[in-house]
Image: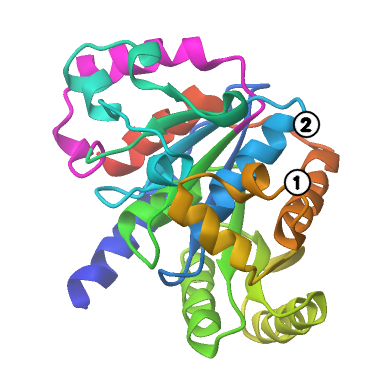
């Protein structure tokens, strides 16, 4: 535990000392994470990305759940390569990025960020140059691992926005609060958005958020925004088994309509400043993890 605390303090110092300016206009980078596993985070990411794509936006998912990513499985596609093949094996971005449903792009993370400090500078510079081919994007969505780790906090620090997924279960809410507590303590982000998954109805989602928001307001200096709730719909379970996202397999289901509403909230937001962009994102990651 002491080692973990020391690691987090080091991360916070690096974020502060190695701040990199935004590259200008580019895709908005959104980190989606959760305090614990099993809350439906990856399902949310995949279906949100497809919904945004169906609205005419250009979306890339970076499956940043190192070693445990399953976005490809949920989309029914099989990647042959991942990000480490771009960095170490001189492969091009277009050879690794996979096109999923409705044109959503997926960049598999694999084990590419388990030892970033070992990546030589020339490999990093080459990788950053290759990222220019991903300039035609509107959103980059980072699907992180669950829980509190250096990797997860690093991805949060490098993104434009943070979305936290929770459920009405007390254990899920407690773990989500603990995650935000660490984010607040190390001043990594001053705001976050919340999605309540696996609810019986919209009322339960709003009540869950209100209780969670009250606790955060009382003890933390993080401003929360409610993005919406997603029903505990059996269509979602069927979609996972069929490896076909529910917004495609069951577009008229309650949960598909709910994620469409969340996508409308995201699309309708007015950007008040430049986004970090794809190159800015990885520059920050290399800086923090080195």
Q: Above or below — where is 72 with respect to 174?
A: above
Q: Above or below — where is 55 with respect to 91?
A: below
Q: Quadrant of the C terminus?
A: top left
In-image side of 148 versus 30 (left or right): left
Q: Nearer the viewer, residue 71 or 267?
A: 71
Q: Are marks 1 and 2 in contact (CB under 8 Å)?
A: yes
Q: Residue at x 77, y 84 (%)?
A: 207
**Which image quarter: residue 89?**
top left
Would residue 120 be counted in the magenta stretch?
Answer: yes
- Judged from the image, the secondary structure of the residue bearing numbered disc 2 is loop
For the residues marked 1 and 2, what is the alpha-carbon distance in whole angstroms? 9 Å
Q: Above or below — where is 136 with respect to 11?
A: above
Q: Residue at x 67, y 77 (%)?
A: 199
**Which sits earlier in the primary sequence, circle 1 or circle 2?**
2
Would residue 215 be counted in the magenta stretch?
Answer: no
Crowd tier of the residue under label 1, counting other residues whose Cα lies within 10 Å: few below 14, some 14–19, many 20 or above: many
- The residue pinned by badge 2 equals 55
Segment colored magenta: 112-139
Q: Residue at x 20, y 76 (%)?
A: 2
- The residue pinned by badge 1 equals 263
In-image side of 9 versus 138 (left or right): left
Q: Quadrant of the N terminus?
A: bottom left
The x, y position of residue 198, in whole percent, is 62, 73
């Amino acid at each position: 535990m002491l080692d973990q605390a020391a690691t987090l303090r080091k991360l916070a110092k690096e974020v502060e000392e190695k701040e990199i300016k935004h590259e200008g206009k580019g895709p908005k980078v959104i980190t989606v994470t959760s305090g614990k596993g099993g809350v439906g985070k990856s399902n949310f990411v995949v279906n949100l990305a497809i919904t945004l794509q169906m609205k005419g936006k250009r979306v890339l998912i970076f499956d940043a759940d190192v070693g445990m990513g399953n976005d490809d499985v949920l989309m029914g596609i099989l990647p042959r390569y991942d990000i480490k093949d771009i960095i170490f094996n001189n492969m091009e971005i277009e050879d690794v990025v996979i096109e999923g449903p409705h044109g959503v792009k997926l960049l598999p993370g694999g084990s590419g960020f388990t030892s970033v400090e070992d990546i030589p500078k020339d490999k990093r510079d080459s990788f950053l140059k290759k990222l220019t081919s991903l300039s035609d994007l509107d959103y980059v969505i980072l699907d992180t691992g669950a829980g509190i780790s250096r990797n997860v906090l690093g991805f949060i620090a490098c993104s434009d926005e943070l979305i936290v997924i929770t459920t009405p279960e007390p254990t899920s809410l407690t773990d989500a609060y603990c995650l935000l507590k660490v984010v607040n303590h190390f001043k990594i982000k001053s705001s976050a958005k919340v999605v309540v998954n696996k609810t019986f109805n919209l009322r339960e989602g709003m009540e869950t958020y209100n209780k969670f928001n009250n606790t955060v307001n009382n003890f933390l200096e993080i401003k929360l925004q409610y993005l919406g709730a997603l029903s505990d719909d059996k269509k979602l379970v069927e979609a996972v088994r069929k490896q076909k996202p529910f917004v495609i397999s069951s577009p008229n289901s309650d949960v598909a309509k709910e994620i469409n509403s969340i996508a409308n909230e995201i699309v309708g937001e007015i950007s008040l400043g430049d986004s970090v962009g794809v190159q800015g994102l990885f520059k920050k990651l290399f800086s923090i993890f080195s």
